[in-house]
Image (cartoon, rainbow, N blue to C red):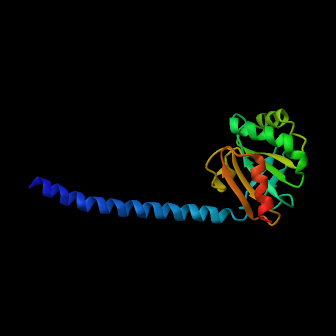
């Protein structure tokens, strides 16, 4: 008698749980889709670069640009800056806007370490309250967002990635 009762309870609970899980996954998928849609063009933001100049969505350089959220202590970030320092001169048309929530002194030291502090196509920005990180729905570090000359999203990734792979998306999606 108790086995039949248990089977009836399980027969009701399992389908209810499955429907609940499906609804949860659907809602989360929709939220993620909305976040990605919001990134298709550059959202409004405002930070300062290491020279005290304002950097906003309205005064970005013309052409292709890559936003990178990094942490100077992150090993992936260090490896990617190593790679960027080697290939940056081959891609002067790509503008790099680098963001971190770390103090200005750490940003400067990081840029100098990779000899990227004087690169004309790189701006180093301080985001002390992580507003850019939150506004762009970033989920990890390093985080890359590539926008073409029309300010349309062509690349989005987080974690370790070859810089050449980021740049390849600009060639593919002209």
Q: Is residue 7 visible?
A: yes
Furthest-left residue in this view: 1
List x then y, in percent, for residue 168. 78, 55
x, y (%) of residue 34? 59, 65
Residue ID at (43%, 61%): 24
Give whichever of 134, 65 is nearer the camera.
Answer: 65
Report the number of numbered marks.
0
Q: Is residue 3 left or right of residue 22?
A: left
Task: Say if 106 sits above or below 16 in the image.
Answer: above
Classify the position of the C terminus by image quarter.
bottom right
Q: Quadrant of residue 85?
A: top right
User: Residue 78 versus residue 43: which sits nearer the camera?
Assistant: 78
Tell me the residue at 31%/63% (across/down): 16
**Can residue 74 be seen by looking at this rendering?**
no
Quadrant of res 101? top right
| Residue sitting at x 75%, y 41% | 80
Quadrant location of the N terminus? bottom left
Q: Give the image location of residue 148, x and y in percent.
A: 79, 62
- Residue at (69% x, 65% y) in the render: 40
- Find residue 146 and report its horizontal and vertical position in percent: 75, 56
Residue 88 vs residue 133, the one in the foreground: 88
Q: Is residue 109 left or right of residue 6?
A: right
């Amino acid at each position: 008698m108790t086995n039949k009762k248990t089977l009836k309870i399980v027969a009701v609970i399992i389908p209810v749980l499955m429907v609940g899980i499906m609804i949860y996954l659907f809602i989360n998928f929709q939220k993620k889709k909305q976040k990605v849609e919001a990134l298709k063009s550059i959202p409004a933001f405002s930070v300062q670069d290491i020279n005290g100049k304002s950097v906003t969505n309205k005064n970005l350089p013309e052409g292709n640009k890559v936003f990178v959220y990094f942490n100077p202590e992150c090993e992936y970030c260090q490896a990617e800056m190593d790679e960027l320092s080697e290939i940056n001169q081959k891609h002067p048309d790509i503008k790099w806007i680098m963001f971190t929530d770390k103090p200005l002194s750490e940003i400067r030291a990081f840029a100098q370490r990779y000899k990227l502090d004087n690169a004309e196509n790189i701006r180093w920005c301080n985001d002390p309250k992580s507003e850019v990180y939150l506004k762009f729905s970033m989920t990890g570090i390093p985080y890359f967002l590539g926008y073409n000359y029309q300010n349309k999203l062509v690349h989005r990734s987080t974690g370790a990635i070859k810089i050449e792979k980021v740049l390849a998306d600009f060639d593919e999606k002209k």
